[in-house]
Structures are given as structure tokens and as C-alpha cells.
Image (cartoon, grey):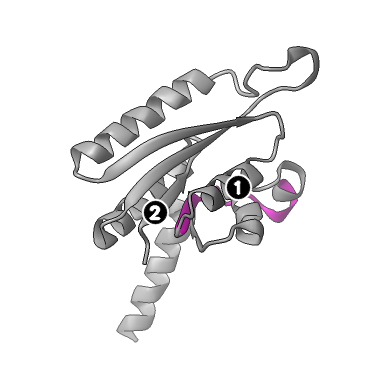
């Protein structure tokens, strides 16, 4: 069912939490993980340069993560997608469609609605435009609170 799993990552802690879920899906189903990172480029006179100064460091980190997956026996590849479009969600969704992905796994940061209004949310965008299921992994604290609530209900 889940043969091709996209792990959409920006190198953040939220994305790191999502990696374990992508790995488990791939291992359970005998599938593959494609780590996808959207490198948004500046337009205009500064065109051709990454929006974020630490882009090369992030890419090295992600290649290391993919190598670790392979060492654990998971079929894994890294794909850097680059565009001056400034819509990482669209870039990831288009890539996922192009490889006929079965699921996209992505972390969430837990921004407020107001922050998302101004900054946008790749996860939110993917939920609306992806052709396949999107597994959104909540922030660690939210996940802990949900687990505590489930445990209280189970005990009652």
C-alpha cells in the first residue's frame, strides 16, 4: 500500500520527528523513503542563491540521514528540488505526484493560526494539494499531551 514514501524535510527538529514514521512505514510495507528537500532560490538581482544561508549545511545533514537509513536496511534516496517559486508545498506535492508517491510524511511545528497566516505552512498546503495521503507529525509536546490523555481515558 505504501511503497513510495516521501519524507518532506527542511532539516528542522519537527522534520526529524517525522523521519521515524516514514522509516517505519517503509520498513513495514517493504517500500522506499525519498527524502525531499525544497531549496527555494531568491529571485531578482540576487537570483540563484538559496533563501537560507545554511542551505549547504542542511543538505549535508539530510544526505547523512539518508545514509543512516540505508545503513539500517531501508531503501532511501535524497532528492533536492530547487525553484524560485517560493512555494515549498507545491514543489513537494508536484514531486510526489511525479514519482507516484503513496504518502507524504511531514513534521509540524505547532505555530499558531496567526503565525501560519503570515508565514504560511508547508504542511497545511500539502494537506490541501497533495494527490496522496499526508501524515502530519505533531510537535513533540502536543504528542506527549495526546498520549497522556489517551492513557487517562484507558485507565478510566
Closer to the camera in the image, 126 or 112: 126
Task: Name the image quarter holding the N terminus.
Answer: bottom left
29 sits left or right of 126 in the view = left
Closer to the camera in the image, 58 or 156: 58
Q: Where are the magenta residues, as a range?
A: 103-115
- Going by the image, does 33 lie left or right of 69? right
What residue appears at the point 40 percent right and 43 percent down from the top-left corner? 34
Give the quarter of the image for residue 4: bottom left
Q: Front-most of 13 and 124?
A: 124
Q: Position of residue 6 (x, y in %)?
A: 44, 49
In reply to whether residue 83 is colored magenta, the answer given is no
Whether residue 113 appears in magenta in the rendering, the answer is yes
Q: Residue furthest bottom?
A: 156
Q: Is residue 141 above or below residue 45?
A: below
Q: Secondary structure at mark 1?
A: helix
Q: Which residue is mark 2?
A: 4
Residue at x 72%, y 17% (from the top left corner): 47
Residue 94 x/y as whole percent: 60, 47
State the residue position of label 1.
94
Location of the C terminus by quadrant is bottom left
Q: Position of residue 79 (x, y in %)?
A: 46, 35
Is the residue 56 above or below the residue 70 in the image? above
Look at the numbered discs 2 and 1 and tell me whether their residues touch, using CB distance below 8 Å.
no
| Residue 16 showing in the rendered view | no
* Residue neighbourhood size for the residue with mark 2, other residues' Cα within 10 Å, grouped as few (<14), some (14–19), many (≥20): many
Amino acid at each position: 500500500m505504501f511503497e513510495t514514501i516521501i519524507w518532506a524535510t527542511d532539516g528542522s527538529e519537527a522534520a526529524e520527528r517525522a523521519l521515524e514514521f516514514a522509516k517505519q512505514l517503509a520498513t513495514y510495507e517493504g517500500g522506499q523513503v525519498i527524502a525531499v528537500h525544497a531549496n527555494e532560490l531568491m529571485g531578482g538581482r540576487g537570483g540563484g542563491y538559496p533563501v537560507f544561508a545554511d542551505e549547504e549545511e542542511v543538505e549535508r545533514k539530510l544526505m547523512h540521514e539518508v545514509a543512516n537509513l540505508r545503513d539500517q536496511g531501508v531503501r532511501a534516496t535524497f532528492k533536492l528540488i530547487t525553484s524560485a517559486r517560493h512555494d515549498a508545498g507545491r514543489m513537494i506535492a508536484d514531486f510526489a505526484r511525479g514519482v507516484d508517491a503513496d504518502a507524504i510524511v511531514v513534521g509540524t511545528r505547532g505555530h499558531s493560526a496567526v503565525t501560519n497566516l503570515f508565514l504560511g505552512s508547508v504542511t497545511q498546503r500539502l494537506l490541501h494539494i497533495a494527490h496522496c495521503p499526508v501524515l502530519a507529525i505533531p510537535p513533540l509536546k502536543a504528542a506527549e499531551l495526546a498520549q497522556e490523555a489517551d492513557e487517562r481515558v484507558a485507565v478510566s
